[in-house]
Amino acid sequence: DVSIVAAADKFPEPREAFARDFEGEVYEDASDLCKSPNIDFVYIATPHQFHKEHVIMAAEQGKHIIVEKPMALTLGDCDAMIDAVDRTGVKLIIGHTHSYDPAIRTMRDVIASGELGNLGMINTWNYTNFLYRPRRPEELDTSLGGGILFNQVPHQVDSVRLLGGGKVKSVRSATGIWDASRPTEGSHITFLEFEDGAAASLVYSGYDHFDSDELNGWVGEGGQARPPGQHGRNRRSLQEVKSQEEETALRTSAYAYKGLGNQGNNTADQHQPRFGVMVVSCEGGDMRPTADG
């Protein structure tokens, strides 16, 4: 069994909501949380540029760690994190999620069984409003982990590599920065080739012109039912924002923890999670995740 016993956040409102919901310890500083003797492992979902610092800090306090993707911003930072957990003897897991989606796991089982013959290709694409959701400044700066390459493409790579079941031998990719006011990568098209000859194409656009949830019956990434025709709304809303400070405040308001009763989930309309549209092609047939299987 796992019990949620503590949380750290720089803002008071999320701390108050957590204390109310879980009757747990709350901290303004993550270092104080890591020192608590009541904690066995921590989940780190801080901005990407702090992952290295916070993982090492938790490891040195003897805490096992789940850290959100991306693991870090450089290979050197990743090596330092690995050295820290090896030195202290704790476990470190990078928090990829979509390779655990039921449909992805089922398709991998079918591929591995040989029921449909050898895997030939995987095509996956996702069109969202990612770049036009309210952002902090660093989320629009690639050097600090901004844009889709650090935040969205890992979901595609994670799922495709699991389905491919082997090592990738070649990568070709083109990325795009198409809006000078959001100066970080918002699109990519990538071609992967596996050692066994299978191939994959990955496409993502976060420019809020088209919403690929339309091709999934208006079911969103987390499996939630969505109203149709929402593409472009975020882009238009941002035109009314007057400053970066206002946008940062909007982001905090939209995504900060507000309490268990304010998460906006309607279980009656809940479907299976998925990440965009995917078609997996084997010698004997094609497969794709759907809203319910």
Image: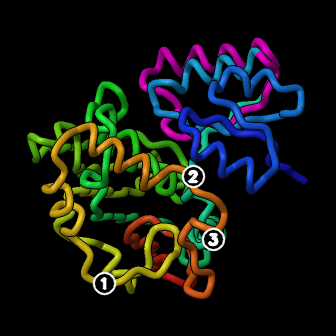
Find residue 230 and report its horizontal and vertical position in percent.
26, 75
Find residue 157 and report its horizontal and vertical position in percent.
44, 49
Q: Is residue 202 magenta?
A: no
Q: Is residue 152 above or below residue 105?
A: above
Q: Quadrant of the C terminus?
A: bottom right
Tell me the SS state at disc 2.
Answer: loop
Q: Mark 3 or mark 1: which is in front?
A: 1
Q: Measuring 59% from the left and 66% from the top, which residue is drawn there? A: 101
Identity of the amino acid at label 3?
Pro
Identity of the amino acid at label 1?
Pro
Please state if 114 lies on the left or on the right of 151 as rendered: right
Q: Is residue 81 magenta?
A: yes
Q: Measuring 67% from the left and 17% from the top, which residue is drawn there? A: 57
For residue 283, what is the image quadrant? bottom left
Q: Is residue 193 visible?
A: no
Identity of the amino acid at label 2?
Tyr
Circle on res. 257: 2
Crowd band around label 1 with a 10 angstrom C-alpha radius: few (<14), some (14–19), many (20+): few
User: Which region shows up in magenta?
Assistant: 61-90
- Of the residues under marks 1 and 2, which one precedes in the sequence? 1
> In this orientation, which residue lies closer to the viewer: 261 or 275?
261
What colour-coding does the image apply? rainbow
Circle on res. 228: 1
Mark 3 = which residue?
Answer: 102
Q: Measuring 58% from the left and 14% from the top, which residue is drawn there? A: 80
Please state if 10 lies on the left or on the right of 148 as rendered: right
Tell me the SS state at disc 1.
Answer: loop
